[in-house]
Amino acid sequence: MLSRLKTTSLQLPVSYRPQLSPARFLVLGYLGVIFLGGLLLSLPAATVQGKSMGTLDAVFMATSAVCVTGLSVVDTARDLSTMGQVVVLFLVQIGALGVMTMSTLFALIMGRRITLRDRLFLQEDLNQGYLAGLVRLVRYCIAFTSVIQGIGILSLWFWFTREMPWQKALYFAVFHSVSAFGNAGFDITGNSLEGYLLSHPVVLTIALLIICGGLGFSVMAELYQERSWRRLSLQSMIIIRATVLLIAIGWAAIGILEWSNPATLGGLSAHDKIWASFFTAVTPRTAGFSVLSTAALSKATLFLLMGLMFIGAAPGSTGGGVKVTTVVVILAGLRGVIKGEEDVNVGERRLPRGDFAKAVTIVALSLLLIFAITGILLVTEDNSLMVTMFEVVSAFGTVGLSTGITPSLSPLGKLLLMTTMFAGRIGPMTLALAFSQNKTGTGRYRYPEEKISLG
């Protein structure tokens, strides 16, 4: 019977064969955008020197932009022409909103019907648990992005006009508003925001853009619709509380660790130290901007930033990392295991049994990837463990904070970081599903049970 079933499955008509899965479609979609972006950035017109930066560096920059990371092998301000910077900006916007969100937007503009297959792909891209309301969520994504980025542009333009002509100030405002809301971290000032350390309005505007982008479009949609804390869903409450808590912890810890460091906060007034500590706590939420030299931070601060970068932002946001909800579910599950409870409870709600296993899988896959890439880079590159792991975690979290080693990496090192950025943007679980083989008949049999010792 089994052999007959297998033979029948092999002889099914082509029309009955499984179509491309959402995970694989998403991977191919992002790879396509990266390839196109790399092609444009490899053109001589994309650089100030009028010479191609090379295929590898162009694809690296495109990967970093689409994955809204911000790690660069060339100086965006000094080496890229206006055309190159605009290409990077468009890639950041596509990466921030998502390939399927942009595709759905164009489909809506053209009046094309959004099919069930389109919604499945969109669900995977936006990391949503339900198919209902996805098209409406896309409309919210576009609306919120336009409004928030527009406000950011106006605010930054007002402050940039104090030091440069209004046309240049407008260009700077557009670039940095899109980059900040997209949690990308690309800049065209030449040294991130270190020159604006004492310009608190600029720093605050960028920080608020980062926070809004990291909350996620579904949270912003709920806040707009409900306008009441009590009517928010459990996921939205978890995201908002975790965001506030992580920023507060990071703010206090960075202030304490760097308060007397002469290379960072040591020479500033108390007021400026507080502002700099606040921004430095916000930016590891996968943004990548910096007002302090990352290389000058203490090892304890770098370790703290790695933790914040690994956690990342909210699901369905412009940020990366394993996501705050994943960490909260794991902590709740661990608490339940310690108390001997079978259920995973969060906020007086019981989560589905599979959520804890999925969260653990995501973190495990992420750590395996980070350790594997770090181990290889320690062999191929001549950098310390702390600096190497910081760069890898920054790439995985799609953050873009760097101690300055990315441009000097070998071709293999750049390829490894590109892979890490891509995995961080797509998600380790989605990437694993895209490469896994669907086997018919799985789940029909259960093997004999046998216990093993743990711990």
Image (spheres, helix red, strand yellow):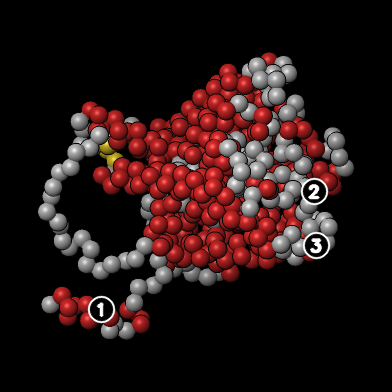
The local secondary structure at tag 2 comes to: loop
Q: Say if residue 11 shows up in the picture.
A: yes
Which mark, by number, is residue 78? 2
Amino acid type at circle 3 is: Lys
Name the residue carrying label 1.
9
The local secondary structure at tag 3 comes to: loop
| Within-10-Å neighbours for mark 2: few <14, some 14–19, many 20+ | few
Answer with left or right where residue 264 lies relative to residue 248: right
Picture residue at 67% right of the left edge, 29% below the top: 296
Q: Say if residue 105 shows up in the picture.
A: no
Amino acid type at circle 2 is: Arg
Mark 2 to mark 3: distance in Å? 14 Å
Answer with left or right where residue 283 lies relative to residue 239: right
Q: Which corner quadrant of the image does residue 91 belong to?
A: bottom right
Against 414, residue 226 (above or below) is above
Residue 178, horizontal then vertical, whole percent = 67, 47
Picture residue at 72% right of the left edge, 16% below the top: 269
Picture residue at 40% right of the left edge, 37% below the top: 327
Q: Nearer the viewer, mark 2 or mark 3?
A: 3
Residue 274, horizontal then vertical, whole percent = 64, 20
Disc tally is 3
Amino acid type at circle 1 is: Ser
* Residue closer to the observer: 158 or 343: 343
Picture residue at 83% right of the left edge, 57% below the top: 49
Q: Nearer the viewer, mark 2 or mark 1?
A: 2
Q: Which of pointers 3 and 1 lies earlier in the amino acid sequence?
A: 1
